[in-house]
Image (cartoon, rainbow, N blue to C red):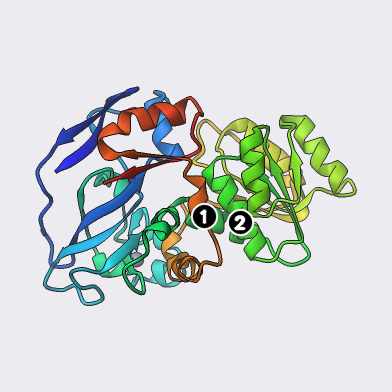
């Protein structure tokens, strides 16, 4: 099969690799229909995270090709969506809704789904079948559910976005845009998207943003305060992961408010005393996408949400290197790879 491998920062290749096989009786092998490049794949691409001959990709939808003898919830031919973390969905942590910290969990990025096929361990717990074979136009949206939609949704839930709330979203990448969509679906009254890119602002408005703030850092915080009677937002979602964005998010949250942080943090250090006096709720981490998948799939299936619009470039898997380049240069928000 063909598979994307990152040899070194900036060096992405598509290679011939051995087809995956069932190893454990709880495995499934899927034929990947579509996969994509994640904002987090840019950290190694830019040399901020170490990388050496790494298989890439953790977002995927596809068709079950083979199942192990103990797989009960899936059958060959099912169209499936899976989260970016393998989870049994039965342990105490999974049952509490934190499948991304499953006691048997592993990251799908160690398997690599920017490939024609993938072996998915703990298939019963990890994969969710769609109600039938999807229409082709639903595939980008179902793929978005695999990570960016589920992650944005978790950010909004962690920030307690809901009726009567003013929500601010820091970050206008795919996850930030999906957090806007989630906040809207959860009934937020006002949604402020922080973005300085016209085409991303437009998408944020499409997904439900009522206000746009272009300023960043302390100026961005001042603008949020100005829009909220000097108090700050009730709910803030951080979807970048840098020191600046994290501080911007913390300082934009009103006392007693909630901050959901879902950008993978890089070099972020928080001062205890500032946190102490901020008096806000902080909740974040790798999103337990599996918790939300059944509901998100249904919303997509019923055409109530259209998260697939975050993909603004689609390329064949063999052109993955061009996809990485386009995202790195911010020519594309998110790149879908057709398989
Ligand atoms: Zn578990």
Q: Which residue is mark 1?
A: 307
Whether residue 136 is visible:
yes
Q: Position of residue 214 (x, y in %)?
A: 73, 34
Q: Is mark 1 within 8 Å of ligand 1?
A: no
Instruction: State the quadrant of the N terminus.
Output: top left
SS class, disc 1? helix
Q: Residue at x 39, y 71 (%)?
A: 92
Q: Position of residue 47 (x, y in %)?
A: 39, 23
Residue 239 relative to residue 6: left or right: right
Q: Position of residue 55 (x, y in %)?
A: 24, 38
| Quarter occupied by residue 314 | top left
Residue toward you, 158 or 299: 299
SS class, disc 2? helix
Whether residue 275 is visible:
no
Q: Residue at x 50, y 33 (%)?
A: 266
Q: Which residue is mark 2?
A: 181
């Amino acid at each position: 099969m063909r598979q994307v491998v990152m040899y070194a920062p900036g060096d992405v290749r598509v290679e011939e690799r051995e087809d995956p096989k069932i190893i454990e009786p709880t495995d499934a092998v899927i034929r990947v229909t579509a996969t994509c490049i994640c904002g987090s794949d840019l950290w190694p691409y830019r040399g901020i995270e170490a990388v050496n001959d790494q298989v890439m990709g953790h977002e995927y939808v596809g068709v079950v090709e083979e199942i192990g003898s103990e797989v009960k919830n899936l059958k060959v031919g099912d169209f499936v969506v899976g989260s970016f973390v393998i989870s049994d969905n039965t342990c105490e942590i999974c049952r509490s809704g934190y499948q991304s910290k499953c006691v048997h969990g592993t990251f799908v990025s160690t398997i690599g789904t920017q490939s024609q096929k993938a072996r998915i361990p703990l298939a019963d717990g990890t994969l969710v079948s769609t109600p039938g074979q999807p229409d082709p136009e639903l595939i980008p949206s179902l793929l978005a559910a695999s990570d960016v939609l589920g992650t944005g949704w978790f950010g909004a839930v962690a920030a307690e976005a809901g009726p009567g709330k003013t929500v601010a979203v820091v970050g206008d990448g795919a996850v930030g845009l999906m957090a806007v969509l989630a906040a809207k679906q959860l009934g937020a009254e006002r949604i402020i998207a922080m973005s300085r890119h016209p085409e991303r602002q437009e998408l944020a408005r499409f997904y439900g943003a009522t206000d746009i703030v272009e300023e960043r850092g302390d100026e961005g915080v001042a603008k949020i305060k100005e829009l909220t009677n000097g108090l700050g937002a009730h709910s803030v979602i951080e979807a970048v992961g840098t020191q600046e964005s994290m501080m911007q998010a913390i300082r934009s949250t009103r006392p007693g408010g909630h901050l959901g942080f879902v950008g993978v943090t890089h070099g972020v250090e928080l001062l205890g005393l500032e946190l102490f006096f901020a008096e806000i709720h902080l909740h974040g981490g790798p999103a337990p996408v599996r918790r939300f998948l059944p509901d998100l799939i249904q919303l997509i299936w019923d055409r109530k949400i259209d998260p697939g619009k975050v993909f603004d470039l689609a390329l064949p898997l063999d052109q993955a290197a061009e996809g990485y380049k386009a995202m790195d240069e911010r020519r594309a928000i998110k790149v879908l790879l057709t398989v």
